[in-house]
Image (cartoon, rainbow, N blue to C red):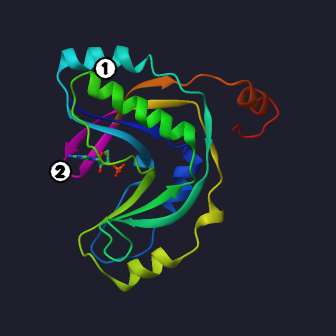
Amino acid sequence: MRLFIAIEIPDDLKKMIGRLRVEIPGTRWVQAEQIHLTLAFLGEVDEPTFELLNEELGRVKVPEFRLCFSGVGGFPDRHRPRVLWVGLEPQPRLQALAAMVRETVRACGIQQEERPFSPHVTLARLKLPHSRQADAFLDQPHKQKLPPFLVQEFTLFQSRLTAQGAVHVQIKNYRLAATADCTQRRKSGKVGT
Ligand code: 3AM
């Protein structure tokens, strides 16, 4: 099974993010329903490792937290973008979650890249590295348009490679630890810390 671990984005936000799409030559946009925030990419995992991983991921306990989107950007950088993304405001609990997830994955014998975790939601992949339209897209202020959301779980996904591209299937959700501040705010209809 080809696996990765990510934070699922609420459906209404996926739709809003999907609407950031513009016409850029040589660009493959991520379909709105597939939009996610990757914590770790695992690649092919055999059945015994999967069983171990499933058990160990259940032990990852970070308190729930709120995520706020920041502006758009490009990898490797905005002047030569191969990937367009929308970033997230710094959130120590997100960094802690990604570090624990990656450590758990490593402890299960699955190699992880050494590059530091750089929180982003991939919007599109570009085959042509430079275009006026990509420049214009990256110059737009998207910051205020996306509301924050509460993260209460993370998800193990299978990525099935098909002729139409990768299809993501949820395998299992892992709950984060509830916090008094988030619970209180949920009751009052506000989004938590
Ligand atoms: O969410 P993003 O776009 O950062 O690029 C793939 C996507 O990340 C990444 O895993 C996420 C879910 O598909 N991915 C795919 N193949 C990869 C690989 N061989 C990979 N990341 C690292 N190494």
Considering the numbered disc 2 on the image, is that residue within a helix, a strand or a loop? loop
Q: How crowded is mark 2: few (under 14 residues within 10 Å), some or many (20 or more)?
A: few
Secondary structure that dominates the magenta span: strand
| Residue 58, image x, y percentages | 43, 17
Considering the numbered disc 1 on the image, is that residue within a helix, a strand or a loop? helix
Name the residue at 36% across, 17% down: 56
| Residue 98, image x, y percentages | 43, 37
Q: Give the mark nearest the N terminus, 1 or 2.
A: 1
| Residue 66, image x, y percentages | 63, 41
- In magenta stretch: residue 163: yes
In this rendering, the answer to whether 165 lies above or below 78 is above
Name the residue at 79% across, 37% down: 189
Q: Which amino acid does label 1 sit on?
A: Leu
Name the residue at 71% across, 37% down: 192
Quarter of the picture containing the N terminus is top left
- Give the residue number, with chain letter if any, for mark 2: 163
Exactly how many numbered labels are in the figure?
2
Judging depth in this view, the residue of 21 and 142 nearest the camera is 142
In this rendering, the answer to whether 169 lies above or below 88 is above
- Give the residue number, with chain letter if any, for mark 1: 53
Question: Going by the image, does 182 lie left or right of 159?
Answer: right
Q: What residue type is labelled 2?
A: Ala
| Residue 49, image x, y percentages | 22, 19
Question: Going by the image, does 57 lie left or right of 46?
Answer: right
In this rendering, the answer to whether 191 lies above or below 108 is below
User: Which stretch appears magenta?
Assistant: 157-168
